[in-house]
Amino acid sequence: MAAGGPTGDDPLIAPAGRDLERTLTGDEELRLNVHQHPMVLWKPVAIMLGALAVLVIIISGDRLPFLVLVLVLAAVAYLAWKMYERRHNSFAATDRRVLRIDGVINKSVPMMRLQKITDMRLDQPLIGRLFGYGTITIESAGQDQTLRELRYAPNPRQVFRRLNSTIFGEEWAGPDQPIMAPPAKRAASAAARSARRAAGATRRRAEQAAERRRPSNSSGPAQSPASPIGDWASQNFFGAGADPSAAPARRRRGKESRENPLVTRRGKQAPSATNRATAAPPPAAPPASARHTAKSAKRDADTDEIPTLRPPP
């Protein structure tokens, strides 16, 4: 692969930047070009989070000093600058040398010929194994080494094998191993997939429950299923009838009697003046002597005594 040419689908050869293209010669073949792992940004990220925490604490006390606001803006600007710098810095290896591009304003391009490299070492701590980065140390015969360490190298095992194949030959290093995601990324992806599946299952169960509650002949929103207790309560809500929100029957009759004076207390309509004139007069009450005689006869009929006969006067 020529310098500055297409990188293809090789994940260990990032597109060559302008500084790298100016450094390489026309007949050099680019074998490796990687940027540092995002873990290199842990310090500016920690500074920004600390500044945001101070800002939140001060805002909760209804105060916003100008100095704290400047501190937060400076932390954000520092993080943005480090991200820009990481994008432009790279470590590259060709068929003739290894080199590193450092700096954006102050440029530094240390390099070493492949023939001077005598030994290499890969260091990968536990946190590096979890997040997928490491440190590659290059040893040479000279005492003064301008290019010695590659810190926060991404995919360190694959980069280490690619350097071995570039320095000592493809037959000695063997074919490249497939690049796998680090354990932390795989665990995060598995957790995200499980969360999406759980959310989808919950949504499907809610939709199925809504479909079961919706009547078959209705296209409107879902309604709760009818039950005997609910039907009885709706029909017998203290005399309110089918509508529980309506007033009871007694109150409705009392209200109607107040609004209409022709309605009596028991709900019967009182006769009007015209009806009273045309109606038949009530029968006259019997005299008191007749009522007394009838009561005496009834009382004598209820007793078993034989009445005594009195002689006529």
Image: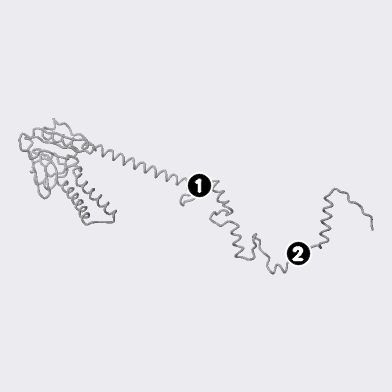
Q: What residue type is labelled 1?
A: Pro
Return the residue at label 2: 282
Q: Name the quarter where the C terminus is drawn.
A: bottom right
Q: Disc number at residue 225?
A: 1
Q: Count how many numbered circles sit on residues in the image.
A: 2
Q: Where is residue 210 in the image (x, y as percent from the top left)?
A: 45, 47
Residue 216 spot, x, y in % from top left: 49, 47
Q: Are marks 2 and 1 in contact (CB under 8 Å)?
A: no
Q: How far apart are marks 2 and 1 (CA)?
A: 58 Å
**Mark 2 closeness class: few <14, some 14–19, many ≥20 residues within 10 Å:** few
Horizontal placement of 174 versus 222: left or right? left
Dot 2 or dot 1, earlier in sequence: 1
Q: In this view, does 220 lie to the left or right of 12?
A: right
Q: Residue 94 carries which label?
A: none
Of residues 70 and 271, the one drawn nearer to the viewer in this rendering: 70
Whole-percent x, y for residue 255 in the image: 59, 62
Toward the viewer: 139 or 256?
256
Q: Residue drawn 11% across and 50% down?
A: 105
Could you say whether the residue bearing mark 2 is in a helix, strand or loop? loop
